[in-house]
Image: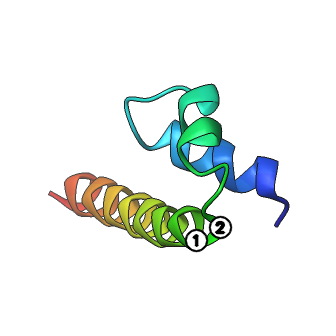
Amino acid sequence: MTQQEKIKMVADTSNHSAKFIEELTADNDQLLENLVVVAKAQIANDANESAFEAMA
């Protein structure tokens, strides 16, 4: 996954713009990686909630 794809994923799962995420993580690759982990967890959680609601 490219850095831009990571930034877009984080931005899409937060209330912040891609530009904000890019500037926030410009000098800190580890922070971006940590935010990607959180974004992936959020995406998985949202998918699980949707599946649960569909079953209910």
Q: Is residue 35 left or right of residue 54?
A: right
Q: Amino acid at mark 1?
A: Glu
The span from disc 1 to disc 2 (Cα, nearest Å) is 6 Å
Q: How many marks?
A: 2
Q: Which residue is mark 2?
A: 29
Which residue reaches farthest right? 2
User: In terms of secondary structure, where does tag 2 sit?
Assistant: helix
Residue drawn at (40%, 66%) of the image? 38
Residue drawn at (53%, 49%) of the image? 10
- Colour scheme shown: rainbow
Q: Quadrant of the N terminus?
A: bottom right
Q: Which residue is mark 1?
A: 33
Q: Is residue 8 left or right of residue 45?
A: right
Q: Is residue 20 left or right of residue 3?
A: left
Q: Quadrant of the C terminus?
A: bottom left
Tag 1 near tag 2, CB within 8 Å: yes
Q: Residues within 10 Å of mark 1 (few under 14, many from 20)?
A: some
At which x and y percent is residue 30? 57, 73
Q: Which mark is residue 17?
A: none
User: In terms of secondary structure, where does tag 1 sit?
Assistant: helix
Q: Amino acid at mark 2?
A: Asp
Residue drawn at (21%, 53%) of the image? 53
